[in-house]
């Protein structure tokens, strides 16, 4: 039997494959006749149309209005928030917040937290924490922490964005879209960097006194 008649009416149901559903059409298309016993099993869906199109996926937790709505066969996803992961088709993701990982996203092994974080991402191994963090990322191994951190990034990979608007046009790096292997700290308003490690240093003639031209050498 596919689907759950009781769940379609908004009640809370459970079944022999250890699924628990609550909300109108939550998990309405789970295929309880799937050939493997682990398929369509151990899912928890709560909210209007949460996991509605899920068929054979397993080990998922979707909580919120239309959370995981279009996750058909994905597994091991945790989605919390209205429309979190709504159109995402990947696996092993954790998204918390309104539309986090939700619009055009297709990610795997990613973590997003904050309104619209990783909303349209198609990446793997990404972490975006903050409003619109890594919204459009399609590269791999990016980490962004902060409001709009890494928001312009598309195909760039292995970047680290820390702080408000880091990696954007208003940060020291400028807008990083396709660039890779960058570390960006904060926006253009940051004026000081403190660290106990003396190996971090800078050299600027504006910070020096008694500077004279060196006249000894080859012509």
Image (cartoon, rainbow, N blue to C red):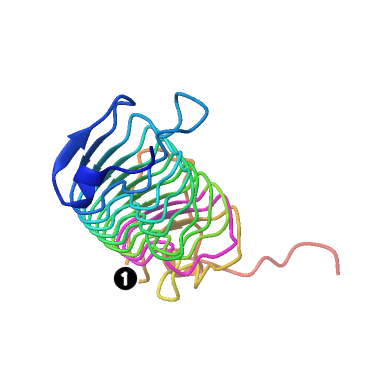
Using the image as rendered, state which of residue 164 and residue 29 is in the foreground.
29
Q: Position of residue 92 (x, y in %)?
A: 44, 39
In the picture provided, is 149 more to the left or to the right than 50? right
**Relative to residue 127, is residue 212 depicted above or below?**
below
Structural crowding at the residue carrying mark 1, measured as other residues with C-alpha within 10 Å and reported as few (<14), some (14–19) or many (≥20) = few
**Relative to residue 192, is residue 41 depicted above or below?**
above
The image quarter containing residue 179 is bottom right
**Furthest residue in direction bottom, as rendered:** 169
Using the image as rendered, state which of residue 166 and residue 125 is in the foreground.
125
In the rendered image, the quadrant that contains the N terminus is top left
Magenta span contains residue 204: no
Q: Main secondary structure of the magenta part?
A: loop
In the rendered image, the quadrant that contains the C terminus is bottom right
Q: Give the residue drawn at x 19%, y 44%.
A: 6
In the picture provided, is 138 more to the left or to the right than 24? right
Magenta segment: 142-166
Q: Give the residue drawn at x 15%, y 50%.
A: 10
Q: Give the residue drawn at x 43%, y 44%.
A: 55
In the picture provided, is 213 more to the left or to the right than 50? right
Q: Give the residue drawn at x 45%, y 70%.
A: 206
Q: Position of residue 114 (x, y in %)?
A: 27, 57
Q: Which residue is mark 1?
A: 189
**Furthest residue in direction right, as rendered:** 219
Using the image as rendered, state which of residue 45 and residue 193 is in the foreground.
45
Q: Position of residue 175 (x, y in %)?
A: 50, 72
**Relative to residue 9, is residue 147 depicted above or below?**
below
Magenta span contains residue 147: yes
How many marks on residues? 1
Q: Position of residue 122 (x, y in %)?
A: 52, 57
Q: Check disc 1 and report its element: helix, strand or loop.
A: loop
């Amino acid at each position: 039997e596919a689907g759950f008649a009781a769940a379609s009416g908004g009640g809370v149901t459970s079944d022999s494959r250890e699924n628990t559903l609550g909300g109108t059409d939550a998990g309405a298309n789970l295929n309880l006749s799937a050939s493997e016993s682990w398929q369509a099993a151990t899912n928890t869906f709560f909210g209007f149309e949460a996991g509605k199109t899920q068929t054979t996926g397993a080990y998922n937790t979707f909580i919120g209005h239309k959370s995981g709505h279009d996750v058909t066969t994905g597994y091991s996803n945790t989605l919390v928030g209205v429309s979190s992961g709504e159109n995402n088709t990947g696996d092993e993701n954790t998204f918390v917040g309104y539309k986090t990982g939700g619009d055009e996203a297709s990610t795997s092994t990613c973590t997003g937290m904050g309104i619209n974080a990783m909303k349209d991402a198609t990446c793997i191994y990404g972490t975006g924490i903050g409003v619109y963090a890594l919204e459009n990322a399609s590269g791999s191994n990016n980490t962004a922490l902060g409001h709009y951190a890494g928001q312009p990034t598309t195909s760039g990979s292995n970047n680290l964005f820390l702080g408000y608007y880091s990696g954007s046009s208003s940060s020291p790096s400028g807008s990083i879209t396709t660039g890779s292997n960058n570390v960006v700290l904060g926006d253009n308003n940051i004026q000081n960097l403190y660290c106990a490690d003396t190996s971090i240093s800078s050299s600027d003639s504006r910070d020096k006194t008694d500077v004279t031209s060196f006249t000894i050498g080859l012509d």
